[in-house]
Image (cartoon, rainbow, N blue to C red):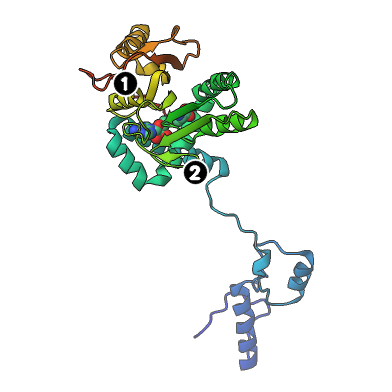
Amino acid sequence: MFFEVPDWKVGKPKTEDEVLKARKEEELKLKGPKPSKKVTFSESSSKKKDADKSEEVKPSVKSLKVTKPTVKKDESEKLKAKLSGSRFRYLNQILYESDSKSALSYFQEHQDDFLRYHEGFQEQTKKWPTNPVDIFIKDLSTLIGRLKDKEEFVVADLGCGEGKLGLEIGALARKKSKRGVVVHSYDLVAVGDHVKVASMTQVPLLDASVNLVVFSLSLMNTDFTKALLEANRILKPSGLLWIAEVESRFDGGFAGIDGFGRKLWEFGFQLQGSMDLSHRVFVLMRFHKSKHVSKVTSDVTLKACKYKKR
Ligand code: SAH
């Protein structure tokens, strides 16, 4: 290829050697200076020194500063919380919109969802000033303290969740040597040996064998009327029934709460004292069994409890 040299500094070259030399010089000029060792990554100072000396700089992979293109930590935490929040609301909906048989088979098939549900449930109750199950544990502790050492006192916690009531009352009874105290904890999934799987509509306990039935936020399924009848069946005459429910589930404010309390008369339960409305989020009701009832003419209903998006 002929190479035109535009800018002679020392006049026209004459010999072939001169032409070749001039071409070479011009070639170099046009190519620009030899690329310097471009180092775009960080190097240790000793490496830098070496780079200056040698022609070829081999980048050391170790010394590369890598910025991971990941989502920021707090953003991924937020995303996780959002997902588990919507999963919790979905599972909550299943519990409120299915009958007990379907709820039992769903959670038996998807036992991990039970744990997820309870994670979300704990998150919700943490926001409340008090948790109804803790109030029941406190009241039951007082009641147990008054029992004679061998006096029988059988409790059925229906829809016990993680079985906190059974664990704490069991420990207290052992500590105080109240040997007649037994707590049966039932739910759709057993999170441990202290919980048994059973639907509250079919409790594996004998008729008139229980002193206290607890439904703490657990009257969820569409057929919980059956669970109330089941409570009547297993309770001893004059046995106790304690219920905690979220206030917003009662239609029409106080009238709704009062109506629910009176409706339970049809189920053979008489209200003891007044309802406890002092906790804002939930209502506590205490009844005792006044008569044996095995069927009712109409169901008792409550609205589903909907938790807000976080
Ligand atoms: N009583 C516990 C848990 C409340 S969450 C507490 O107060 O902390 C409500 C629980 O009721 C859930 O664990 C749910 O699985 C259970 N539940 C709902 N329907 C049920 C049914 N038909 N039989 C047994 N448990 C039921």
Q: Residue at horizontal 57%, vertical 27%? A: 150
Q: Residue at horizontal 57%, vertical 78%? A: 5
Judging by the rendered image, the residue that carries numbered circle 1 is: 303
The reply, left or right, for residue 20 in relation to residue 239 is right
User: Where is residue 163 drawn, in percent x and y?
Assistant: 49, 34
- Earlier in the chain: of badge 2 and badge 1, it is 2
Circle 2 — which element? Answer: loop
Q: Quadrant of ligand 1?
A: top left
The reply, left or right, for residue 260 in relation to residue 215 is left
User: Where is residue 43 drawn, in percent x and y?
Assistant: 72, 64
The reply, left or right, for residue 27 in relation to residue 255 is right
Measured Cα–Cα span from mark 2 to mark 1: 33 Å
Circle 1 — which element? Answer: loop
Question: Which one is in front, 90 or 143?
Answer: 143
Query: Hey, which residue is sitting farthest left in the picture?
Result: 297
Q: Residue at horizontal 52%, vertical 47%? A: 71
Q: Dot 2: within a 10 Å radius of its alpha carbon, few (fewer than 14), some, or many (20 or more) residues? A: few
Q: Is residue 239 above or below residue 2?
A: above
Question: Which one is in front, 106 or 56?
Answer: 106
Quadrant of residue 8 within the rendered picture? bottom right
Kind of residue sitting beneath label 2: Asp
Quadrant of residue 6 within the rendered picture? bottom right
Whether label 1 lies within 8 Å of ligand 1 gets the answer no
Q: Dot 1: within a 10 Å radius of its alpha carbon, few (fewer than 14), some, or many (20 or more) residues? A: some
Query: Hey, which residue is sitting farthest front in the picture?
Result: 150
Residue 193 is labelled as 2
Query: Hey, which residue is sitting farthest bottom in the picture?
Result: 16
Q: Is residue 112 above or below residue 187?
A: below
Kind of residue sitting beneath label 1: Lys
